[in-house]
Amino acid sequence: MIQIQEVTKKYQDKKVYVTALKHVSFSIQKGEVVGLLGENGAGKTTLLRTIATLINPTEGNVVVDGFDTVKHPNEIKKQVGVLFGGETGLYDRLTARENLEYFATLYGLSKHETKVRIDDLAKMFGMKDYLDRKVGGFSKGMRQKVAIARTLIHNPDIILFDEPTTGLDITSSNVFRQLVHQLKREGKTIIFSSHIMEEVSMLCNTVAMMHKGELVYHGNLEDLYQSEGSRDLNYIFMSKLVRGNEHYAS
Ligand SMILES: Nc1ncnc2c1ncn2[C@@H]1O[C@H](COP(=O)(O)OP(=O)(O)O)[C@@H](O)[C@H]1O
Ligand SMILES: [Mg+2]
């Protein structure tokens, strides 16, 4: 379980403070697939980086399976896999297998564990045919698979994807969607940010909508459709912003 408790994050940009998160609170249960929605600058990346222990909250706490992100980052890193938008972090001159082996070493996996894990991931992602080819010549879709496999190399229970399909073509986006379905079946907890409403409505049980650092809505997607009397997430999102306009405009 992930508990986000009254999290505020302020960045200092020269002498100006930017408040990226304002008293954000919600919890995520094991096995939930959460879509983090919001316009540019809403605070999505900041929230994901905080959960991943890459940055510390200015106020409040994030607790992952009982561990505080500030006090016990190493415990959390073991069980979290992160993929930040666009950047695959792969080495073109290495083969897909060598790339995965490299990341396995960083997580302290043994040679045997690494081999078994890479075989499993290759099977799961249909990468067997090109596992021993250099990544440099790969299509975007192939790269995307290797990048996601890299995120999963240490078999994390929690997976964070920041704008995973931004800038990808339809084929590569579909690769991502299929993989999320697969991970969902394995009972993984997945949080991904997106501004593509369709993607979120296809993949998520839960949505968290953010606007200017504030959590505008968090809850079950079906419940939201019911209460809004619509299944058009784009419309719901916009109308929530309009209704909250006086409050959020400040
Ligand atoms: N390192 C940083 N220094 C200063 N301001 C930042 C930094 N990172 C993000 N911000 C600001 O924090 C706000 C939230 O950004 P971000 O979390 O990246 O939003 P999103 O991912 O939803 O687009 C924005 O106003 C952004 O400009
Ligand atoms: Mg972002």
Image (cartoon, rainbow, N blue to C red):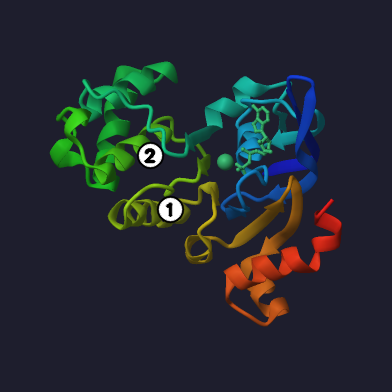
User: Picture quarter containing residue 152?
Assistant: top left
Q: Can you give x and y, in whole percent of width and height, for residue 210 in the image?
A: 69, 52
Q: Secondary structure at mark 1?
A: helix
Front residue of 122/60: it is 60
Q: Amino acid at mark 2?
A: Ile
Which residue is at a point 73% across and 60% down the rendered structure image? 217
Which residue is at a point 37% across and 22% down the rendered structure image? 104
Q: Can you give x and y, in whole percent of width and height, for residue 70 in the image?
A: 72, 23
Q: Can you give x and y, in whole percent of width and height, for residue 113 in the image?
A: 34, 25
User: Picture quarter containing residue 230?
Assistant: bottom right
Front residue of 187/249: it is 249
Disc 1 crowd rating (10 Å Cα; few below 14, some 14-19, many 20+) is some
Residue position for label 1: 180
Q: Which mark is residue 148?
A: 2
The image quadrant where one finds ligand 2 is: top right
Which residue is at a point 25% across and 40% down the rendered structure image? 122
Q: Ligand 2: does it lie within 8 Å of the C-beta at label 2?
A: no
Disc 2 crowd rating (10 Å Cα; few below 14, some 14-19, many 20+) is many
Q: How many numbered discs, if any?
A: 2
Say if 128 sits above or below 219 in the image: above
Q: Amino acid at mark 1?
A: Val
Q: Please report contact status of discs 2 and 1: CB closer than 8 Å, yes or no.
A: no
